[in-house]
Image (cartoon, helix red, strand yellow):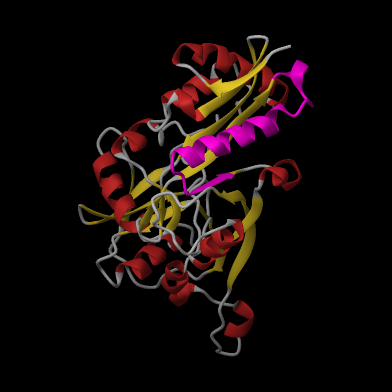
Amino acid sequence: MSCEIRALQEDELEVHDRLIYESYKEFEHERLGIGECGWWRTHINRDPYYSPEQSRVLLVDGEMVASVSAYRRPMHCSGRPAKVGAIGSVATHPEHRRRGYVRQLMAECRSWMESEGFDFCFLFGRQEVYGGSGYEMFSAFETIASVRPPTADTGLTFRPADFETDVPALCELYDQFCCPLTGPFVRTRDYWERRVPGGYFRDYAPNYSLIREGERAVGYMRSDSEGSVAELGWLREEPDLPARVAAAVVGLWPHLGEVRFGFFTAELIAALDPLVWAPSAAVYGERQSALHLVETYKGLWTYIGPGAGLFPEVTDTAGLLRFLRQHEYCFWRGPDSF
């Protein structure tokens, strides 16, 4: 029996797609469509950063039986561009499982990322499965705010984003807001046009809105359900805008009394501060914060190497996890899932 590990080749995309299908089809009912035939080809066709070399495959006697992909995901990282790999599409044909092929491919992906000058890598999976490959669990926070509807007019309105005409505005708002943050992926115009509207999962819908002052776009939001904000951003040059945006968002659901934000930053807390309230304390005329931070799993991470030398303070995986927490890591699930 001969065993070969190498990069996927351009003329093998269809074969690889079939391997993904055979590996995941038994989980289709719980994995939101990723077990459907043709899913993987659709996924990479929407990914402007993908090239076949990112997928490392294992062949047994010439047959492709396992694969791991390290998707390129350039990431905003506290004002610096991080070269990040995102491990996904981990697949082993059912007839070839429990032979250690995935661990071999994880090692191969790591070697490839080191040679390509990656800084960090992460994935979504179980610690007991990937811990042996050097990945450590990381959690960050989401924000739940018990809020009162704003009493004053914010002067802001919401309009559903049109991906035929609004991509330039979304690009500008996203870049300005996300550049100082740590975690959001870099989204080129091509990424907005190809990746964001289709997302990754079958049931994803791009529910983006532009937040406007008159005819000028001053912010954007993605809300996947009533009272739940998955993504939010605003122009940074106007000091009073964050509080006005927060008030306008809260005003969308005055009957709920609670809004969930899928991220946490000090900026968000400051913007929500005038709106939070605690009914029990209000009886006594007291002001008490009713912001709750919920710890949420944010993947498994590993340090790859010094890359271009932009992160001298990070030299190992433990240091990487400290860095992410200190810089209030944010991940926009949905269009950035992989």
Q: In the picture shown, does residue 77 fall above or below 163?
A: below
Q: Residue 240: x percent and y percent?
A: 30, 72
Q: In the picture shown, does residue 218 fall above or below 106?
A: below
Q: Residue 134: x percent and y percent?
A: 66, 47
Extreme left residue here? 215
The rendered magenta stretch, by its main secondary structure, is classed as helix
What span is colored magenta in the figure?
Answer: 93-122
Of residues 192 and 44, the one drawn nearer to the viewer in this rendering: 44
Position of 283 with respect to 75 (left or right) is: right
Q: Residue 244: x percent and y percent?
A: 34, 67
Of residues 305 and 135, the one drawn nearer to the viewer in this rendering: 305
Position of 265 with respect to 191 (left or right) is: right
Q: Looking at the rendering, which quadrant does residue 73 occupy?
A: top left
Of residues 137 and 37, the one drawn nearer to the viewer in this rendering: 137
- Is residue 258 in view? no
Which residue occupies 57% across, 83% down?
282
Q: In the picture shown, does residue 58 fall above or below 117?
A: above
Q: In which quadrant will I find the N terminus?
A: top right
Residue 99 part of the magenta-drawn span: yes
